[in-house]
Image (cartoon, rainbow, N blue to C red):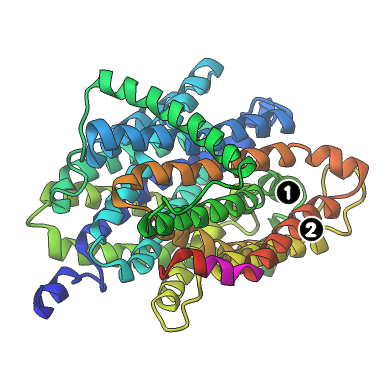
Amino acid sequence: MNTTSKTNEFSLLGHKPALFVLFFTEMWERFSYYGMRAIFVLFLTASFSDGGWEWTRERALGLLGIYTSSVYLTPIIGGWIADKFTGYQKAVALGALLMTFGHGALAFETEFMFYVGVGLLIAGNGLFKPNVTSVVSGLYDKYPDRKDGAFTIFYMGVNSGGFLGVLLCGFLASNLSYSWGFGLAGVFMLLGTLQFWFGRSIFGKIGSTPENKITILQGIIEILQGIINVLVSIFKFFGNLLNKKSSTKTINKESKIQRDRYIVVGILAFFVVFFWAAFEQASGSMNLFARDYTQRNLEGNSALIFKIVDTIITIVPLGIISWVLLKLFKQTFKSISLSNIILGISFLSIWGIAIWKLSVILPADNTEIEASWFLILNSLFIIGLAPLFSKWWESKYNPSAAVKFGLGMLLLGIGFGALAYGSSGIPQGAKTASVSLVWLVLAYLLHTMGELCLSPVGLSYVSKLVPAKKIGVMFGVWYLAIAAGNKIAAMVGGQIDTIVAKYSMSHFFLIFTIIPAAAGIILILINPLMKKLMHGIR
């Protein structure tokens, strides 16, 4: 490939235009996911008079944990289905459609339909999540040095959707009803489905068909063989430990290198569990902390400052994303016009709801910040900081995988340390308090910086350390580790009342300070070993 053709290929902000089609596809999926998740626990624990179901915090967080962990378990199956039956593109579209139906079911606000909706969301995520990232990976298979930057830009799409979803679904839930919040998530999931389907031609043959298509019967046989192979591998592993005479000479050099790289993926996945177990307190205990323990009623100058800030953070990110949208239109409108039209309609709708939101809050003399509002801070900081981190990863100062992960864990722990300090004045066993919102804002800033060091580059490292034909399944394995973290997050977060009653709120947050910080230090210390096992992969 000559220099000119390569330059044309990376013609949109230094990346492929196809990357930004996936950027917006992922954005709408995350809009629906984070928008729904922001009001999930608040709805279940709110009083009947406030439109909720009055569940206990432990029960609500328990269901949240089942949902958030399951949506990362099913990608293992979804990745396999795409690899063997549908291809990545069809799996993404089918998953998005199932999630559309799931959000629609939630809007009915009956217990049966709520469980149906959660089930559809879990299944849809399983098909969507691993395969959209597999398409991103396929776009950059020939340019591994650009993958870190590409996945970080893609991660901006994730958090752009999260930002808009929390902002607008939370607003409708607070000002109309929770049904409107859940319903809005479904509408934009449908628009995202259509935008992807009518724009898929831009990906060419990437993920259009499975590499090794098989029949359903062959699939069943392969599943059984896979289970048997796993069991045989476990027995062999322990057999080799007992028989020290076993020789490694039969393992050729190439196989040994790949084995070492799998070990790196395993180590990183192990520490990812600890990261998400703490980070995912955001939609659970931190959401409850925002509602019940944070000063959200503002008057006078404080209310005025918040309105100015809220207006800026509503208009500016929307403006930036719209600018990217226009750039995409200029380069792809002729080739995928219907996809772009749907995308344009979606953004006009977003602007309409955003302007309505501002028209409601600006005239009032005082204001009460919605508890879910704080969740937009993570996405907002991602949008602002992701380009800086992307440039860092592409510079000569790009740290190794273990150092990136270690920094992410340390920043996460420090963020919870800020919350532990800020809540130190809350009496033991208190059910409400009025802690300054500054501590939540600071925690979300530090957590976001930690996330940027770990989450997007984690996907990139998996794609670089694993053979191409195993990427779909290995992304699923990666999400298995995230699932474990989400489940642990809900289990520990569900004990917030017990821990606060027996100790204090500060003690509760110290749990999430010490463990991630210790894990971060360990990762940095084992960096030389990790670099050796990666065999030149950076």
Callout 1 amino acid? Phe
Say few, some or many: other residues with alpha carbon within 10 Å of mark 2 (under 14 / 14 to 19 / 20 or more). many
Callout 2 amino acid? Val
Closest to the observer, 536 or 436: 536
Question: Mark 1 sits on what residue?
Answer: 289
Residue 319 appears in the picture as rendered: no
Looking at the rendered image, the quarter that the C terminus falls into is bottom left
The reply, left or right, for residue 229 in relation to residue 79 is right
Q: Is mark 1 in CB contact (under 8 Å) with mark 2?
A: yes
Q: Position of residue 83 (x, y in %)?
A: 28, 37
**Residue under the image location 43 percent in, 41 percent down:** 476
**Residue under the image location 13 percent in, 48 percent down:** 201
Q: Position of residue 308 (x, y in %)?
A: 54, 68
Q: Which of disc 2 and disc 1 is earlier in sequence? A: 1
Q: Is residue 116 above or below residue 169?
A: above
The stretch drawn in magenta includes residue 37: no
Q: Position of residue 125 (x, y in %)?
A: 41, 36
Residue 84 appears in the picture as rendered: yes
- Which secondary structure lies at badge 2? loop
The reply, left or right, for residue 209 in relation to residue 456 is left
Between the C-alphas of marks 1 and 2, the distance is: 9 Å
Please identify, in this view, whether the residue under mark 1 or under mark 2 is nearer the observer. Answer: 1
Please state the extent of the stretch shown in magenta in the rendering. Answer: 525-531
**Residue under the image location 53 percent in, 37 percent down:** 236
Q: Is residue 329 above or below residue 528?
A: above
- Which secondary structure lies at badge 1? helix
Closest to the observer, 520 or 91: 520
Question: Mark 2 sits on what residue?
Answer: 435
